[in-house]
Amino acid sequence: MDFVNALVLFSNFVIVPALSYGSQLALGAIGVTLIYGILRFANFAYGDLMAFGTMFAILFTWFFQSIGISLGVLPTALLAIPFAIIIAILFSLLIDKFVFSYYRIKKSPPVTLAMVSIGVMFVINAVVRIIIGPFDRRFFDGERFIIRANEFKEMTGLNEGLAIKSTQVLTLFITIIVALILFWFLNKTKTGKSMRAYSDNEELSLLSGISPERVVMITWIIAAILATVAGTLYGLDKSFKPFTYFNNLLPIFAAAIVGGIGNPLGAFLGGYVIAFSEIVITYAYKKFFAYLLPESLEPNNLIQLLSTDYKFAVSFSILVIVLLFRPSGIFKGRDS
């Protein structure tokens, strides 16, 4: 019974949160890796693009709530996401047209585009703060938990409870659906194959009659969709604060690089690698080992490798290790 309690405890504080957080990172990492693979630069504004899309999801959620529209037990934000996606797409295409396309036409090196994206990042961040403010915004409504810890204890008779939030299940479900649709699109449709061909060999794809303008446009559309969905799911699961999305840029980039930059499937899996690494390393195992070890060997300290305050250090460390020993990532990505 102690082993089962330990397993439930570990699931409650590590496995379930990591699956949810990993799903959010996975969607963001795919967006980053698509932009790098096709547009050839690291987009440091992506975290703030997530915040931008999420902001409009919140604004539309508030609007629907004000006129009495809801989805019952499901969060109203799910109804707002499509409208937020449309605005995020238009905004991304405008940014590309008036900023990035200039440097792309000039054949500027990737480092120049990356520096430009930092400028865009600050602009988007300022816009979001001006419109919605810098404070925490909680916009979840509907049924909060699918199962509560106390209910689980009563059902099983265990000492430990398992709490599963509806947002965690929604995050995992929506991520799987979005990822399946995206991979089908990239591998089975003519447009998706054109994007892959353009990413693999730009000059040869142009000779084949592939329109670079169309490929670039579709890339920004997909990136905006992924940013809005990932950002909104993160905000529903935790809360919305603009600076948080800037902070999440590090684990998102780490996930993309670990999975192999330019490789969407690798980026997807890399999101879960980073999420599990952060949570496993920063979790305090005292109670977990108290269930598994004899009373004489029970630990007196927290048995925590790193404080949760340093969870981003885990992402950074993994990023550095991968860049040093396997620059192409776990799944081979672009070499340049």
Image (cartoon, rainbow, N blue to C red):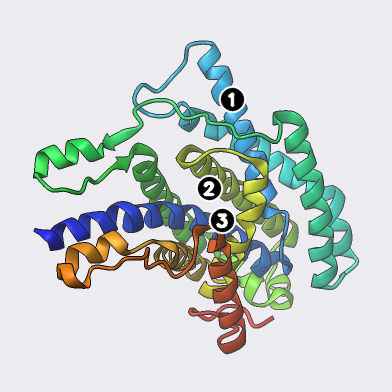
Amino acid type for the residue under numbered disc 1: Phe
**Quarter of the image with the C terminus in it:** bottom right
Which badge, 1 or 2, comes first in the chain's sequence? 1
Q: CA distance from mark 1 to mark 2?
A: 17 Å
Residue 288 lies, in percent from the top left, at 26, 62
- Residue found 61% across the figure and 86% down from its top: 324
Determine crowd level at label 3: few under 14, some 14-19, many 20+ residues with C-alpha closer than 10 A: many
Query: Are the residues tagged 1 and 2 within 8 Å (C-beta)?
Result: no
The residues bearing labels 2 and 3 have C-alpha atoms spaced at a distance of 6 Å
Residue for badge 1: 60
Q: Secondary structure at mark 1?
A: helix
- Determine the residue positioned at 46% across, 26% down: 76
316, 47: nearer the viewer: 316
Sequence-first tag of 1 and 3: 3
Numbered marks: total: 3
At 41% across and 64% down in the image, what residue appears?
276
Q: Is residue 142 above or below residue 25?
A: above
Quarter of the image where one finds residue 32: bottom right
* Label 3: element kind: helix
Q: Which mark is residue 257?
A: none
Q: Give 298 or 202, whichever is nearer the viewer.
A: 298
Residue assigned mark 2: 230
